[in-house]
Image: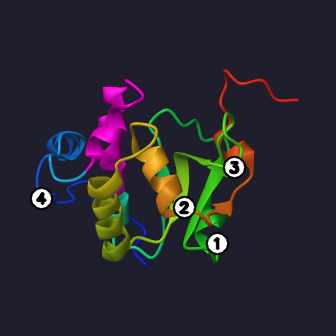
Amino acid sequence: MSSTLSLSLPLPQHPALFADKLSHSTSGPTSQNTHTGRRDLAASLTKLHAFRLVQYEKVIFLDADTLVLRRLSHLFESPHSFSAAPDQGWPDAFNSGVMVLEPSQESFDGLIDMMKRKGTWDGGDQGLLNDFFPNWNRLSFTYNVTPSAYYT
């Protein structure tokens, strides 16, 4: 397994165009992805490209607003193909801001196919990923604590 990530990953087209293409597609009921009124979430679909990093056995995906306070390297040892932390608003769903995944072209193609066929219930990647991975492995919520939430 390589220990470095190339920042020049070749994409078939610009990621923003990829998200725009998915959110405006006329083939299939993808208009469902805008029922929340949050068209800005369409750009979050670019994180699906993490599944195309097939040169790696496992990938830890972190949203840009994630603040890492301790080592995460132990997550690479997870026996699960997909793990995420529960969402603070929907405890039976995961938040896609921190994910541990095994990249595969098959998963990427399946996600794109699902997006084209049925869209996403939240307007972005999180609803799509939750539908695609219904049996996700639950990480501790501490991996993706939301500062505006109240925890008791």
Say which residue label 3 marks: 92
Report the amino acid beneath label 4: Pro
Q: Is residue 66 left or right of residue 152?
A: left
Label pair 2/1, CB-CB below 8 angstroms: yes
Q: Position of residue 141 (x, y in %)?
A: 73, 45
Q: Nearer the viewer, mark 4 or mark 3?
A: 3
Q: Nearer the viewer, mark 1 or mark 4?
A: 4
Label whose residue precedes the other's in the sequence (3 or 1):
1
Given residues 37 and 146, the one toward you in this image is 37
Label pair 4/3, CB-CB below 8 angstroms: no
Question: Which residue lies at the image location 58% right of the left edge and 63% below the top edge?
Answer: 134
Label whose residue precedes the other's in the sequence (4 or 2):
4
Label whose residue precedes the other's in the sequence (1 or 4):
4
Q: Nearer the viewer, mark 3 or mark 1?
A: 3
Helix, strand or loop at label 2? It is strand
Label whose residue precedes the other's in the sequence (4 or 3):
4
Label pair 3/1, CB-CB below 8 angstroms: no
Say which residue label 1 marks: 78
Given residues 27 and 80, the one toward you in this image is 27
Say which residue label 4 marks: 12
Q: Position of residue 22 (x, y in %)?
A: 22, 47
Label pair 1/4, CB-CB below 8 angstroms: no
Say which residue label 2 marks: 100
Viewer can see residue 53:
no
- Residue most extreme to the top: 148
Report the amino acid beneath label 3: Asp
Question: Which residue lies at the image location 61% right of the left edge and 64% below the top edge?
Answer: 136
Whole-number angstrom distance, CA of label 2 to CA of label 3: 18 Å
Q: Residues within 10 Å of mark 3 (few under 14, many from 20)?
A: few
